[in-house]
Image: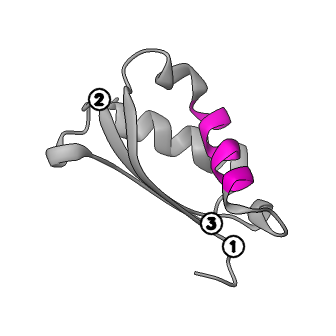
Amino acid sequence: TSIVDICTDKIREALDATDVKVTGAYDDPNGSHISIEVVSSKFDGKRPVQRQQLVYKAIWEELQGPVHAVDSMVCKTPDEA
């Protein structure tokens, strides 16, 4: 199982997300840099920083090891998507 798959599953589960896309930089699924796009109703009423904090919390374990950086993060509610 790749880092991308693990992060995708953890984010989807933690945020009950309707859509999650995690990609590794340079198309490397086990890369240390990832980009994240998430659509979740749990973002309703939250500021952008609060939305990002929810995502970081979901993948905190990976950020302590294999993932060194999140290059970009897009967090939307279903209405914004």
What amino acid type is highlighted by mark number 1? Thr
Q: Nearer the viewer, mark 1 or mark 3?
A: 1
Location of residue 65 by image quarter: top left
Q: Residues within 10 Å of mark 1 (few under 14, many from 20)?
A: some
Dot 3 lies on which element? loop
x and y, in percent, of residue 46 in the image: 80, 62
Q: Is residue 16 magenta?
A: no
Residue at the disc numbered 1: 77
User: Looking at the picture, does residue 16 appear above or below residue 8?
Assistant: below
Q: Residue 66, how many percent across, how many down?
A: 36, 20
Distance CA(mark 3)–CA(mark 2): 25 Å
Question: Badge 2, how many Cα within 10 Å: few under 14, some, many 20+?
Answer: some
Q: Is residue 54 magenta?
A: yes
Q: Which tag, 2 or 1, sits closer to the chain's start? A: 2
Q: Position of residue 51 (x, y in %)?
A: 69, 55
**Which circle marks residue 62 in the picture?**
none
Residue closest to the eye, 45 or 18: 45
Residue located beneath label 3 in the image: 18
Residue position marked by numbered label 2 in the rendering: 32
Quarter where residue 2 is shown? top left
**Left or right of 40 in this view: 81:** left
Q: Of callouts 3 and 2, which one flags the residue occurring earlier in the amino acid sequence? A: 3
Question: At 56% from the left edge and 20% from the top edge, which residue is drawn?
Answer: 61
Circle nearer the viewer, 3 or 2: 2
The kind of secondary structure element at disc 2 is loop
- The amino acid type of the residue labelled 3 equals Thr
The amino acid at mark 2 is Ser
From the viewer's side, name the closer residue of 56 and 78.
56
